[in-house]
Each structure stands twice: as C-alpha cells, then as structure tokens.
C-alpha cells in the first residue's frame, strides 16, 4: 500500500531543516572565533600594562636607591626650567603627574631612567613588538622635613611605558630619609 499524498507533502523538509541547522552552527562558530580574538586582545593589553607598571616601579626603586645612597642631596629647588636629564635631581615644584609626558612651563621635566641594558626603546613614531615606547622617567619632589626632625620626606613619581604611547603607568611613593641614611617607605 502506498500513500502518494503523504510523500509529496514531506519533500524538501529535510533540506530546510539541514540548512537551518547549518546556519545555527555557523553563527555559533563565528561568535566563538570572535570571542577568541577579543580574548587575545585583552591578554595583549594586560601584558603591555604589566610591562609599563614594571618599568615605572623599576624607575621608582632606582630613585629610592639614589636618594638612599647619594652622599649629598640638593635642597629642593625650582625645576621648571630643567629638561629631561639622565642625572637625578630633587625639586620643590610639581608638574601635573596625571598628564604624561610631564611638563612645567611647557618644558619637559623628569629624569630619564635608562641605566639598565635590558630596556630597549624605539622611535616614538614607530614602536615595534618587544620594545618599550620610551625609557621610564622619575621625578623627585622635596616635601620638607619630617615631624620632630626625624629626617627629610620626598615624593617619588615614576612613569613607564609598554610598547605604545597608550600603555603608560604612573606610580608614586613617599620616602622618609633619616639622617643616618635608613629608609622607610610609606
């Protein structure tokens, strides 16, 4: 016995169902690959930010080391006319540390920290992978004497870059330098 009407009514239904499943699977695969690409971008950004923070902390630690080992420290002075130098200095006026690069009276200020060989920098206009956008910098501010004459208090601000100008980190610490040369970080 055959049922010709039933067979003709079902023709093409398997094709339509198969096409719909194929479209759903394709959309799921595309969203999975898009999510994977987003995760790669996030991981790359986190890596560059960590590199920037490490460079800034390295400059900050060098500034603390310099303060702790310098035989004579200059009394805080006006550093608004001083350009970026490789020689540490102590200043009494602050640039806007939220805006990088730091400037006072439209002149760059700070100390370029490029004293270790593993820090390679590139031209700021064309950075490449594996390099830093710029050498880290630090700025030392003399905050004045500590309470009860227990030493001198300094503020250290340091900045570091990752591979691009957009990956920048700024760290800050206060540093108590006792007359005996013993340091206390706060």
Image (spheres, helix red, strand yellow):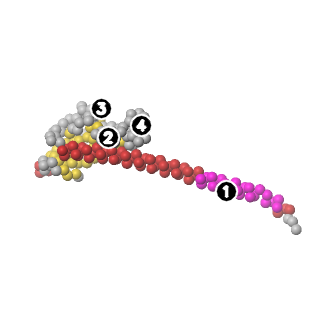
Dots 1, 2 in contact, CB < 8 A: no
Which of the two marks, 1 or 4, is nearer to us in this view? Answer: 4
Dots 2, 4 in contact, CB < 8 A: no
Residue 56: x and y, percent? 31, 45
The residue that label 1 is drawn on is 21
Q: Which of marks 2 and 4 is nearer the N terminus?
A: 2
The residue that label 2 is drawn on is 117
Relative side of 154 to 40, left or right: left
Relative side of 110 to 32, left or right: left
Residue at 16%, 46% in the rendered image: 152
Of residues 173 and 47, which is closer to you in this image? Answer: 47
Q: In which quarter of the image is residue 25?
A: bottom right
Of residues 20 and 84, which is closer to you in this image? Answer: 84
Quadrant where the N terminus is found in the figure: bottom right
Secondary structure beneath dot 3 equals loop
Residue 163: x and y, percent? 40, 41
Q: Give the range drawn in magenta.
A: 7-29
Residue at 26%, 38% in the rendered image: 111
Which of the two marks, 3 or 2, is nearer to us in this view? Answer: 2
The residue that label 4 is drawn on is 127
Q: Residue furthest right?
A: 1
Q: Earlier in the sequence, mark 3 or mark 2?
A: 3
The residue that label 3 is drawn on is 106
Residue at 29%, 37% in the rendered image: 112
Marks 3 and 2 sit apart, C-alpha to C-alpha, by 30 Å
Marks 2 and 4 sit apart, C-alpha to C-alpha, by 18 Å
Residue at 13%, 49% in the rendered image: 180
Dots 3, 2 in contact, CB < 8 A: no
């Amino acid at each position: 016995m055959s049922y010709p009407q039933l067979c003709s009514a079902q023709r093409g239904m398997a094709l339509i169902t198969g096409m719909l499943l194929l479209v759903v699977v394709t959309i799921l695969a595309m969203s999975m690959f898009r999510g994977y690409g987003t995760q790669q971008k996030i991981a790359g950004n986190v890596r560059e930010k960590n590199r920037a923070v490490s460079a800034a902390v390295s400059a900050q630690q060098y500034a603390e080391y310099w303060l702790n080992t310098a035989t004579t420290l200059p009394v805080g002075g006006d550093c608004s006319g001083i350009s970026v130098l490789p020689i540490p200095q102590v200043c009494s006026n602050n640039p806007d540390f939220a805006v990088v690069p730091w400037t006072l009276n439209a002149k760059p200020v700070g100390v370029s920290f490029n004293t270790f060989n593993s820090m390679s920098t590139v031209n700021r206009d064309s950075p490449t992978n594996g390099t830093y956008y710029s050498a880290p910098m630090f700025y030392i501010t003399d905050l004045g004497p500590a309470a009860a004459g227990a030493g001198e208090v300094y503020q250290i601000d340091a900045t570091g870059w990752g591979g691009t100008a957009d990956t920048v980190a700024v760290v800050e610490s206060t540093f108590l330098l006792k007359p005996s040369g013993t340091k206390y970080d706060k």
